[in-house]
Image (cartoon, helix red, strand yellow):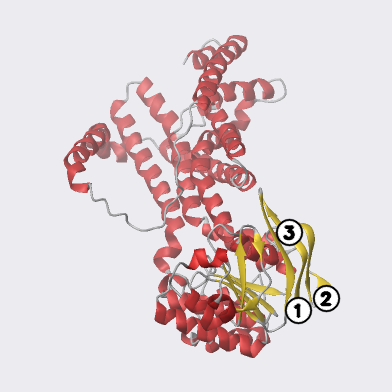
Amino acid sequence: MLNLNNVRFQQGDFGLTADFSVPTGARVAVIGPSGGGKSTFLNGIAGFIGTDMGQVLWAGELMPDHPGKRPLSILFQEHNLFPHLSVMDNVAVGISPNMRLSHTQRHEVSVALDKVGLADKSASFPRDLSGGQKGRVGLARVFLRQRPLLLLDEPFSALGPALKDEMLDILCEILDDTDATALMVTHDPKDALAFADQAVLVADGHADAPKPIQQLFDAPPPALAAYLGNRT
Amino acid sequence: MAIYQAFRLDFDLGKAASLAVVQFSLCGSLAVLAFLVPLPQTNGLGLGRLPQRVDASAHRTVDAFWIIAAAAFLIFPLGAIFLRGVSYIPNLPHQVIAASLTSILIALISTVVCITMALSLALAFARRGKFARSLAEGIGVLGLATSPLVVGTGLFLIIFPYAHPMTFAVPITASVNAMMALPFALRVLMPAVRETYADYLHLRSSLNMTRWVWLSRIVLPQLRRPLGFAAGLAVALSMGDLGVIALFADPDLQTLPLMLYRLMGAYQMDQAAAVAVVLVVQSLALFWMFDRGGRGYVESK
C-alpha cells in the first residue's frame, strides 16, 4: 500500500498536497487540468522533488530519499531510452546500471524482450525503432525490474489510438504478472477508463483521494467538469 | 608585435612586461564591455532534423552572393599559395618534417588539455544558472582576451630565473594554445552537456546509476559529436598558431607557422608557400579526423 501522510511536495514556489492511500495492486489514473500538479504529484512520489511536510510510505515503511532506491519504476513522457545504447542495453540498465550482466540476468533480459515481442530487436538502436517499438522497450525494462509500484507520466501520449491500446494491453499484462500498483497520468478520459479502476483528481495544488473512476466521470466535481468540458 | 620585439630583438624583459600589462588592461576592459552586452539565446543542437524553410527561395540569391563572397576571400589566397607552393614541396629542407612533428605534437597535447579543461568546466557549470554559465564562459574567454603573447611573457618571467625557458617550449606552447581554444570548446560543449543532463538526469537517478557509469557510459558517448568537433577546432587552432612559440623557440625548434614566418623573413617565398600548403593540408586533415571521429557511431550504427 502506498501511503501519502498529509504530504506536501514542493517544487519552486508550487506546492502540492495529498493525504490518502492507494491499495496494493490498484490501477489509478491521475487526471486533472494542465498546471494543476499532476507531474509534481508523480515526481514527488518518484523522489525527484522533496517533501516539506508529511511522509510518503510504501508497505508501511518510509520511502528512501534517492529515487533509484525507491521500490518503483517510472516511464516518462519521453527520454526513456538512451539513444546510443542498444535495445538490449536499454533494457539491461533496469537491473544492472553498468550494463554488465550475469548469465541469469542476460536470460532475464531476453525473457523481458520476448514478453513485449522485441526478441529479434535486441541489437537494434532506438533510432531504428518505431514509436510503438520504443514504448515496448520501456515496458520491457519495467517488466524486468519487477518493482511493486509503477509510475507512468503519459508515456504513450504521442502514439496513435491503435498503438496506444496495444501498449495499454501489454502494460496490463505486465501488471497482472507482477501484481504491481500503477499510477498513470493521462489526458485522455478514454485511456483512463480503459486502464484504471480508480482515479485521482489533481487540481489547484491538491490531489484528491482516489475514487472509482466511473463514478468520478459520471458526477465530476467542478474542477474536473471544467477540464473535461462537455465531452463525456 | 611590440611585445615580441621587446623580447626577441631587445631582450628587454621589463619593457615586454609593461607592454603586456598595457595589452592586458586594454583587452580586459573590452572584455568587461563585451560581457555587458547580452548574448543571443542559442537553443543547443536542435533535434537532428532538417528544418523546412518556407522562406528559402526568397533568400537563395542573396545567400549565394554572400557565401561566394566569403568563400572568395579564402579561396583566392589559398589558391595562390597552392599554385605557387605545391611544386616546391619536394625541394623543402628536411626541417619541414621535424617542424611538422613538433606542430602536430603540440597540437595534440594542446587538444587533450583543452578538451579536459572544457569538459570539466562544462560538467561543473552547465547545469547551474545563467550567471554561473556566463561566468564559466567568461573564464574561458579570459585566456583569449589576455592574448598568448601576454601569457607567454608571464610564463617566461616565471621560468627565467630558474631554468632555460626554451626547454619548456613544447609544454608551454601546448598549454597556452589549449587556453586559446578553450572558449570555442566551451561554446560547443556547454549546450550539449546541458541538454544531456536535462533529458536524462531523471532516468539516471531512477535507475540508480553511479556517477562513474553515468559519465563514462552515458554522458561521454552522448557528447561524442560535440567533443569531436571541439577537439577538431582545438587541434586546428593550435596547428596554425604563431604566438608563444615565437618567444620560446630556439633556432633548432620550430613549428610549421614559425618556419613559415622565418622563411618569409628570409624572402624565401616559394618555400614559404610550400610550407603553407603543408600546414593547411595537415590542419585540415587533423580537424577532419577529430570531427569525423565524433560522428563515428552515427554512421557505423
Q: Do the residues labelled 3 and 1 touch (CB within 8 Å)?
A: no
| Residue B176 appears in the rendering | yes
Q: Are marks 2 and 1 in contact (CB under 8 Å)?
A: yes
The secondary structure type at the circle numbered 3 is strand
| Residue A83 appears in the rendering | no
Check residue A60 in the rendering and tell me which mark sits there, or answer none.
2
Q: Which chain contains the residue that carries disc 2?
A: A
The mark nearer the N terminus, 3 or 1, is 1
Q: Can you say whether B54 is above or below B139 in the image?
A: below
- Where residue B66 sits in the image (x, y, percent)? 23, 35
Give the residue displayed 65% in from the left and 64% down from the top: A41
**Mark 2 vs mark 1: same chain?**
yes
Q: Can you say whether B148 is above or below A186 in the image?
A: above
Relative depth, front residue between B83 and A229: A229
- Where residue B60 sits in the image (x, y, percent)? 19, 43
The secondary structure type at the circle numbered 1 is loop
Q: Which chain contains the residue that carries disc 3?
A: A
The mark nearer the N terminus, 3 or 2, is 3
Check residue A8 in the rendering and tell me which mark sits there, or answer none.
3
- Where residue B103 sits in the image (x, y, percent)? 48, 39
Disc 3 crowd, CA 10 A, few/some/many (<14, 14-19, 20+): many
Q: Real-space Cα distance between discs 3 and 1?
A: 19 Å
- Where residue B234 sits in the image (x, y, percent)? 48, 41
Q: Real-space Cα distance between discs 3 and 2?
A: 18 Å
